[in-house]
Image: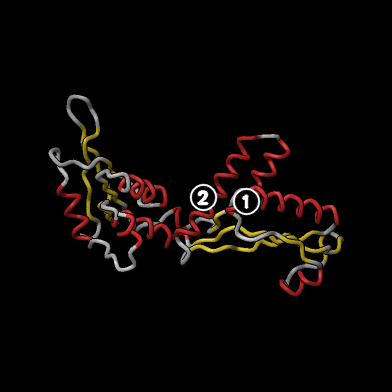
Amino acid sequence: MRRTISDPNAIVPSRSVQESTLIGASSTSPLDILVVGGGATGCGVALDAATRGLRVGLVEREDFSSGTSSRSTKLIHGGVRYLEKAVFNLDYGQLKLVFHALEERKQVIENAPHLCHALPCMTPCFNWFEVAYYWMGLKMYDLVAARHILHLSRYYSVQESIELFPTLARKGKDKSLRGTVVYYDGQMNDSRLNVGLACSAALAGAAVLNHAEVISFLKDEGSERIIGAKIRDNLS
């Protein structure tokens, strides 16, 4: 399965094949999971379940990533603000969140290098306290990232900062620019990454269908347990 997903020549099954698989599911040959919604969460669930050997179907009323998953900040951030909270509030839970986010950030970039990359973020400083504060904080961010680090953060002088970013303001609230601190987080093409998840789920064996709307759920008469769904193909 891993070879199939990573094979650049692998072909995702056609829409008609996906539709036939969903229609062919029955009480004698049921799906283990039907995922409703083809956003990042739904496609991620479908891929996760399919790679665990479950029979999976996924339906999306519109197109994959047509909603929230195409309207994100496009950032894959490790949670530098959570690190600040962890330090000042002595909150280990926040620190664990940063460790997890940094690991996931690196994983996403390695899994989809054609859609994700490191993004430099420049923080202007208008007094020397800000320079020291941001520099130390972001060096701590580097330290926490450890082997998951993208690039080391660093301080740039005023002249270097203006050369790198000519439109940067030299004055702010009657204070002169003292330099900038640059650190790195990740950036992604969110909608294409979502489509990549859907295609990977299909290659792993899931039946994935867009423009397919759930009209109602079918329930077992005795237990009232959901046992199926009525789905409309919005293209036909």
- Viewer-nearest of discs 2 and 1: 1
- 69 to the left or right of 142: left
Q: Secondary structure at mark 2?
A: helix
Rendered location of residue 171, percent (x, y): 83, 65
Name which residue lies at 73% across and 50% down. 137
Query: Looking at the rendering, which quadrant does residue 159 occupy?
Result: bottom right
Q: Secondary structure at mark 1?
A: helix
Q: Is residue 197 left or right of residue 103?
A: left
Residue at 67% x, 59% y is: 152
Which residue is identified by label 1?
A: 146
Please give the name of the residue rendered at 33% of the width and 64% of the height, measured from the top-left corner: 7
Residue 186 drawn at (x, y percent): 56, 59
Residue type, mark 2 in image: Glu
Residue closer to the observer: 41 or 202: 202
The C terminus - image quarter: bottom left
Residue neighbourhood size for the residue with mark 2, other residues' Cα within 10 Å, grouped as few (<14), some (14–19), many (≥20): some
Q: CA distance from mark 2 to mark 1?
A: 13 Å
Residue found at the very far top of the displayed protein:
222
Check disc 1 and give the amino acid type: Ala
Q: Residues within 10 Å of mark 1 (few under 14, many from 20)?
A: few
Quarter holding the N terminus? bottom left
Name the residue nearer the viewer: 52 or 220. 52
Badge number at residue 13 = none
* Residue 221, percent from left and from top: 17, 28
| Near-viewer residue (26 or 205) | 205
Q: Which disc number belongs to residue 104? A: 2
As drawn, 6 above or below 39: below
